[in-house]
Image (tube, rainbow, N blue to C red):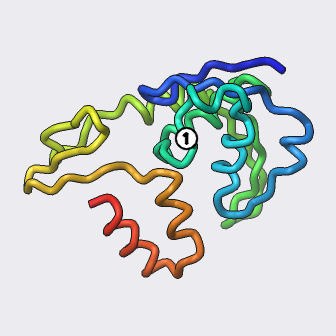
Amino acid sequence: MEQIAVDAGGVRVHVRGLSGRDELQLTDAPGEMRRLVSRLLPDGHRGASPDVEELTIAQRDRIVASLWGHTYGDVILATHRCSACTEPYDLSFSLAQLVESLWDRPCPPDVVELAADGCARLRDGTSVRAATGADEAAVGGLPLEQAGAALQARFV
C-alpha cells in the first residue's frame, strides 16, 4: 500500500494510506486518533518512526490532517444548522491553511525559551512540555478535575 511522508512538526513520519477498513473501524471513543495513527504505521517501519505515544497531540493531529487532505482533498465542506434560529448555513475552508495558521503562531509572551527537547521555559522559571499520547492515555478514564490535575503533574 502507498506510503505517505508527513511532516508532523519537526518529526518526519511515514504512514500508509487510509483504507476502507480503517474508516469502518473508526469510532468516537477517546483515544481513537491515537489508535488510528498507530495502525497506519507500517509494521516494517515502526522502528524508524516515533512511537505514537511519544508524539505530541499537536503532532498526531497534524498527521491526521495530512491523511485527510491526502485521502479526501484539502477543502472541508460542511452544512450545519444555527442553534439559535435553526437555519442551515454552509462552511468551507482549506485544511492545509488552517494547519499552517495554527502551527506558525508566535510563542505566548510568557515563553522565554523553547528547548530542543520541546519543553518551554516560562518567565517565572517553570518548564512545561506539550501533552503526548501517553499523557492522554494515562488520564483517559479520570473525571475532568482529576484529569486536569494529573496532566499538570505530568508536564509542568
- As drawn, is 61 to the left or to the right of 122? right
Q: Is residue 115 above or below residue 66?
A: below
Instruction: Say which element carries label 1.
Output: loop
In the rendering, at what x and y percent does residue 143 appear? Answer: 52, 81
Say which quadrant the C terminus sits in: bottom left
Q: Amino acid at mark 1?
A: Asp
Residue in view at x 65 percent, y 37 percent: 64
> Where does residue 20 sit, x and y in percent of width and height?
91, 37
Q: Residues within 10 Å of mark 1 (few under 14, many from 20)?
A: some
Q: Is residue 133 left or right of residue 31?
A: left
Q: Nearer the viewer, residue 41 or 140?
A: 41
Say whether residue 138 is visible. yes
- Percent coordinates x, y for residue 38 in the rendering: 67, 42
Residue 58 relative to residue 87: left or right: left
Q: Which residue is mark 1?
A: 51
State whether residue 137 is above or below residue 75.
Answer: below
Quadrant in the rendering for residue 87:
bottom right
